[in-house]
């Protein structure tokens, strides 16, 4: 309990300094995570519930799609996959900057320490809290990535499977 008592004042004191940049970046990244997740759910629902069912192409009692319909479906599916991959790539790049932000905060806090050795303890605490926030958010977003990544991969496999069925469909 004493450790928590000792660590809270420096965190509170540095909250509105460089740490605020890290926290605001984390809030923005969380919002972007939710956006990417909603997009991946939309892709999944499009593939699995709105008519993109590879097994239906093999049934004899369904009306065969025309060449133009197949072409339009292929374009739509490829565009969905490309957009999904672009959004997910942006998310993974955003999450990878948190350790770097923590290190940057550490360096920014330690450089003035060379000029003002009397205030060394204050600068050192700023350096440590920046590192702390960078690591906390890096771990948090890595866990969220573990939730998002399988959905993106499953969607890409579903799109690939459906495109393969379209390619082999008899017209």
Image (cartoon, rainbow, N blue to C red):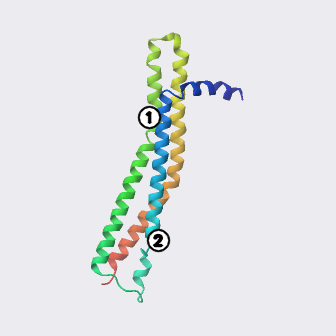
Picture disc at residue 100: 1
Residue 111 sits in quarter: top left
Residue placed most toward the observer, 107 or 36: 36
Residue placed most toward the observer, 143 or 77: 77
Examine the rendered structure and indicate whether residue 46 appears above or below residue 119: below
Image coordinates of residue 151 in percent, x first then y, are: 48, 60
Q: Name the residue under label 2.
A: 48
Residue at the farthest right position? 1
Residue 54 sits in quarter: bottom left
Question: In the rendered view of the protein, which quadrant contains the C terminus?
Answer: bottom left
* Mark with earlier residue (1, 2): 2
Image coordinates of residue 114 in percent, x first then y, are: 45, 14
Question: In the rendered view of the protein, which quadrant contains the N terminus?
Answer: top right
| Mark 2 element type | helix
What is the CA distance from the residue labelled 1 to the residue labelled 2? 39 Å
Q: Which residue is drawn at 33% across and 67% down?
A: 76
Image coordinates of residue 110 in percent, x first then y, are: 47, 20
Q: Residue at x 68, y 26 (%)?
A: 5
């Amino acid at each position: 309990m004493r450790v928590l008592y000792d660590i809270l004042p420096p965190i509170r004191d540095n909250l509105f300094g460089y740490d605020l940049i890290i926290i605001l970046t984390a809030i923005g990244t969380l919002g972007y995570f939710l956006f990417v997740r909603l997009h991946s759910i939309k892709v999944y629902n499009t593939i699995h519930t709105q008519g993109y069912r590879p097994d239906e192409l093999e049934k004899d009692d369904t009306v065969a799609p025309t060449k133009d319909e197949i072409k339009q479906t292929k374009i739509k599916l490829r565009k969905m996959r490309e957009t999904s991959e672009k959004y997910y790539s942006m998310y993974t790049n955003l999450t990878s900057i948190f350790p770097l932000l923590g290190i940057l905060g550490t360096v920014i806090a330690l450089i003035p320490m060379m000029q003002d050795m009397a205030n060394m303890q204050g600068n050192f605490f700023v350096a440590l809290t920046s590192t702390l926030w960078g690591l906390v958010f890096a771990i948090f977003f890595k866990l969220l990535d573990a939730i998002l990544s399988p959905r993106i991969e499953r969607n890409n496999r579903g799109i690939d499977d459906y495109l393969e069925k379209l390619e082999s469909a008899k017209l």
